[in-house]
Amino acid sequence: MENPSKYLGNELKYLEKVLNSESWSATGGNWNNTLEKAFAKRFGVKYAVAMNSGTSTLHAALEAAGIGPGDEVISPAITVIMNSTATIHANAIPVYADVDPKTFNIDPMDVARKITKKTKAIIPVALYGLPPDLDPIMELAKKHDLIVIEDNAQCVLSRYKGRLAGTIGHMASYSFENTKHISCGEGGMIITNNEKYAEMVRKIGGHGFKNLKAEEGRIRLNQDVFQNPHYKRHDVLGWNYRLPEFNAAIALAQLERIEDLVDLRIKSAKYFIDVMETCDYLIPQYVPEGYTNTYYTLGVVYEGDKSIGVSWEEFRKAYINNGGDGIYGAWSVAYLEPMIAERQFAKRCPWVYENVKYEKGLCPVAESVQPKIMQFKTNYRDAKLAEIKAKVLLKTIRQFSKK
Ligand SMILES: Cc1ncc(COP(=O)(O)O)c(C=O)c1O
C-alpha cells in the first residue's frame, strides 16, 4: 500500500543527491559518514558504525569483542531469533536467561545463574522499547569480565534511570528495518565509546580492509596507495555488512526527525493504554520508575481466558472484526524454535555444539508469559489513526463485558 506520509522529511531530496553522486557505496560516498556522525552526536557517544541490518551489527559486535568458537553468550528467552543467530554466526553458544514476567525483559538474577567459565558476553534486549535492568547486568559484566552489547533494535531514545539507553553497555546495536523507529528498509548501527571496538566492527563489516578506522568507512582515500599492485589490503576476516548510500541517506532524513517519530509511537501507545485501564485483563508492559518506553510496539499480557472466559484468539478476532489492526503474539521462546530446539545449527561447528542442547522448561517464566502476550501496533503515521483504533479496542472490551 502506498504511504506517502512515510517520508515527510528530506528522504526524497537526499535520495536524488545520492543518485547524482559518484559513489553509491560507503567505500567512497559521504552519506554513511554523515549518518554515523549525526547518530553518534544524537546519542552522545564517540563512534557510530552503520551496517546493513541489526543482525549484522550484533554479529560484527560479537566478533569485534573477540567472541568465538565455544564461548557462551547470554541473551533473553523472549526475543527475536537474531540474538541467537548472531551468536551462532560467531560459532559461539547461545545461553538463555529467563525474563521478568511484568517487563518481559531479561532477569539479571537468572543471568547471574547462567554465567559459567565460558561466558564471554551478554546481549540484553530492550523489548518493545523498554530498556532492561542494566545496572546489575553491568555489575555482573564487570565482575566476570564480560562484554555487554545492548540490543536496542526496538528501542530508540528510551531512558534507563535517567541515562540514554544505548550508552550504558560496551556497545549498542540498532536496526533500521522496515518497522523500526528509524527505517530505511533495511539497515543498522553500532554505537560505542570504545575506539578499538568501533574499528574492529567496521573492519568485520567491511571485508577486513586494513585502512578502515573507527571514524572512517571510506577505503579509497589515497588513490596512489590503493591502486598500487604491491598494496596489501586485508588484515582481518570480514563480511560485507556495508549499508548502501541510498539507505544511509534515508536513515539520515529519518534521524533528523527522530523526536517526532518516537513521540508518535508513544502517543499511539498511550491511546491504547488508556483504554486498557477500563478492563482488568489487558495488562501493558510494566514500566519501572525511572525508565521510559518508546513503544516500538505496545506489549500487553492478555488474561482474558481467566477474567472473561475469552481466548487470546477469540479476542484478537473480535478486535479485527470491529475494525482493529492485527494483533501479533510474541515470538516463540527462542530455544523452542525448531532451528535451535532441533539443533539444526549444530552441524556448522560440530565440535563446539556436540553437548549443547535446549529443552522445554529452561526458562519457565518466559514459557508461561510468552503465549499470553499481545503486541498492539504503534507504528501509525498519524496519531489520529491510533486514536480511532483505540476506540475499536474499547468497543471490543465493552462487547465482552456485556456477555
Ligand atoms: C530485538 C531485535 N534484535 C535484532 C533485530 C534484527 O534486526 P534486523 O531485522 O535489522 O536484522 C530485530 C529486528 O528485527 C529486533 O527486533
Image (cartoon, rainbow, N blue to C red):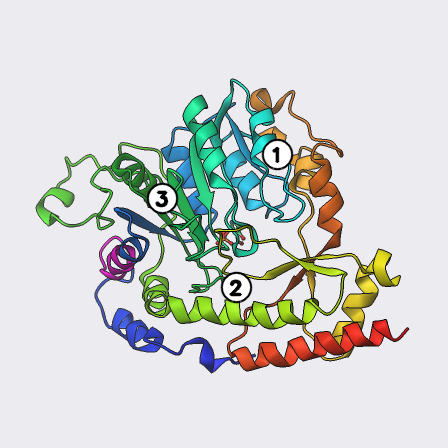
| Picture coordinates of residue 367, whole percent (x, y) | 73, 42
Task: Please state which amino acid type lies under the numbered disc 1.
Answer: Tyr
| Picture coordinates of residue 343, whole percent (x, y) | 67, 32
Asked if residue 173 is among those painted magenta in the image, a careful observer would answer: no
Query: Which quarter of the figure has residue 21?
Result: bottom left
225, 5: nearer the viewer:
5
Mark 3 lies on residue = 205
At a point 71% along the width and 32% down the height, the residue shown is 362
* Quadrant, the N terminus: bottom right
Marks 1 and 3: which is nearer the front? 1
Q: How many marks?
A: 3
Q: Earlier in the sequence, mark 1 or mark 2?
A: 1
Name, please, the residue furthest toward the front: 289
118, 87: nearer the viewer:
118
> Gap in Å between the C-alphas at discs 1 and 2?
26 Å
For the magenta stretch, what is the residue range?
A: 27-38
